[in-house]
Amino acid sequence: MAVTRFSVSLEEELLEALDGFVQENKYPNRSQALRALIEKNLVEKKWQCNNVVAGAIVLAHSNIKKEIGLKLMEIQSQYSDIILSSQRYYIESDTCIEIVAVKGVAHRLTELSDLLIGIKGIAHGKLIMSKVN
């Protein structure tokens, strides 16, 4: 892919913030950091446009409270059209992580993740999406 050079003017504070972002994320240079930020913005815009995306919903919760597992299964059964698979990993004696692989229209993935993350007893949840094409 051909690369085009262009010039960018930034206020000093914004440039310092960009340099901090480069260091924190271990990018080799500002160009790579800007490229990543632009691509992230485009992917997120695609989500809002309801294009087809793929991703994962990661949930951390107690495996002792059986009602959490039952509620997870109940909600997931209603979204079987977008769920590719679901895996549960026991990371401690009373804690597990569940990873739900999904593919579909962005708003449906967001809807599902909001329902799952909102279950009482979910300690942490996050939806990660990526463009399919």
Image: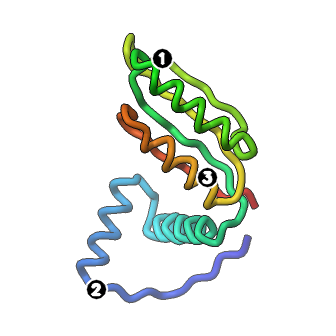
- Judging from the image, what secondary structure is the residue with disc 2 in? loop
Residue type, mark 3 in image = Leu
- Assess disc 2: are there few (<14), some (14-19) or many (≥20) residues with their C-alpha within 10 Å of its C-alpha: few
Residue type, mark 1 in image = Tyr
Labels 3 and 1: the sequence-earlier one: 1
Query: Measured from the top left, where is residue 97 in percent x and y?
Result: 48, 27
Out of 2 and 64, give the one closest to the viewer.
Answer: 64
- Judging from the image, what secondary structure is the residue with disc 3 in? helix
Q: Which residue lies furthest to the top in this view?
A: 93
Residue type, mark 2 in image = Glu
Kindly identify which numbered label has been placed on residue 131.
none
Residue at image position (38%, 38%) is 124
- Judging from the image, what secondary structure is the residue with disc 1 in? strand
Query: Measured from the top left, where is residue 128 in percent x and y?
Result: 54, 49
Quarter of the image with the N terminus is: bottom right
**Residue identified by numbered label 2:** 11
Q: In which quarter of the image is residue 14?
A: bottom left
Type of colouring: rainbow
Quarter of the image with the C terminus is: bottom right
Labels 2 and 3: the sequence-earlier one: 2
The residue mark sitting in front, 2 or 1, is 1
Q: Are marks 2 and 3 in contact (CB under 8 Å)?
A: no
Position of residue 53 relative to residue 62, above or below, is below
**Residue identified by numbered label 3:** 109
Q: In which quarter of the image is residue 13?
A: bottom left
Query: Measured from the top left, where is residue 71 in percent x and y?
Result: 52, 31
- Side of 84 relative to 110 (left or right): right
Kindly identify which numbered label has been placed on residue 90.
1
Distance Cα–Cα, label 2 vs label 1:
48 Å
